[in-house]
Amino acid sequence: MEVQSNLIVLVIGVSGSGKSTIAKALAGRLGLEFLEGDDFHSPEEIAKMASGHPLTDQDRWPWLERIHAALEAHVATGKGTVVACSGLRKVYRERLVAHIPDARLVYLKGSQELFAARMHRRKNHFMPASLLDSQFATLEEPGPEENPITVPVDGPEEDTLKAIEAGLKSRIQMI
């Protein structure tokens, strides 16, 4: 799929939804840069989550600001980017893409049971499966006003990527 070189795609979902895996693969397929939202967490935020405590809004705002600044820098230099970030609440997503025209939102949707099973299988990640309840409690699924590409992630990765590409193609043609 050929895309604008300055396209910004925000891949969101709760922990265990496959954000990093899907966003990285999507960036590779589209020839865009990849940003891992987790890389923008402070050591204190990581320690808090690793100890089993969910982040508060007060904890999240500086993290969201760091990601937003990186996205703005990419936009300023014309670098298309796919970023993996939980973006659990609408207000977080609004902040992430503020002043970034035509950013695309991809929401990876699935069941809490599926994501818990995935989290139990992964190794060397700071986010414990015990925090999944708090992620789902915080989650505000994107509504139609956000024009999301909502993709179920209970099937093969290739199906997820194809669905995202089809959604992106239809939205890019709308502009």
Image (spheres, rainbow, N blue to C red):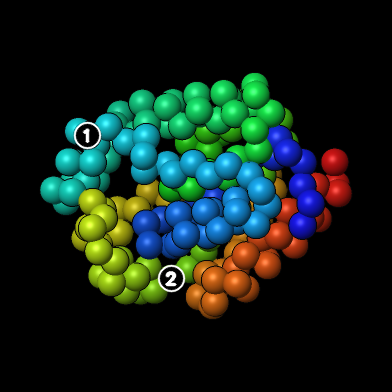
What residue sits 65% from the left and 22% below the top? Answer: 76
Q: Which mark is residue 111?
A: 2
> Badge 1: few (under 14), some or many (20 or more) residues near its Cα, within 10 Å?
few
Q: Count the marks: how many?
A: 2
> What amino acid type is highlighted by mark number 2?
Ser
What residue sits 25% from the left and 64% below the top? Answer: 123
- Seen as rendered, the residue at the extreme bottom is 155
Placement of 28 over or under 92, stated as above or below: below
Residue 111 drawn at (x, y percent)? 43, 71
Left or right: 23 in relation to 131: right
Name the front one of labels 2 and 1.
Answer: 1
Mark 2 lies on a secondary structure that is loop
Residue 164 drawn at (x, y percent)? 66, 60
Placement of 136 over or under 145, stated as above or below: below
Residue 31 drawn at (x, y percent)? 66, 48
What residue sits 65% from the left and 57% below the top? Answer: 29
Residue 63 in which image quadrant = top left
> What amino acid type is highlighted by mark number 1?
Pro
Earlier sequence position, callout 2 versus callout 1: 1
Q: Which mark is residue 43?
A: 1
What residue sits 48% from the left and 47% below the top? Answer: 84
Confirm whether residue 28 shows in the render. yes
Residue 23 drawn at (x, y percent)? 53, 53
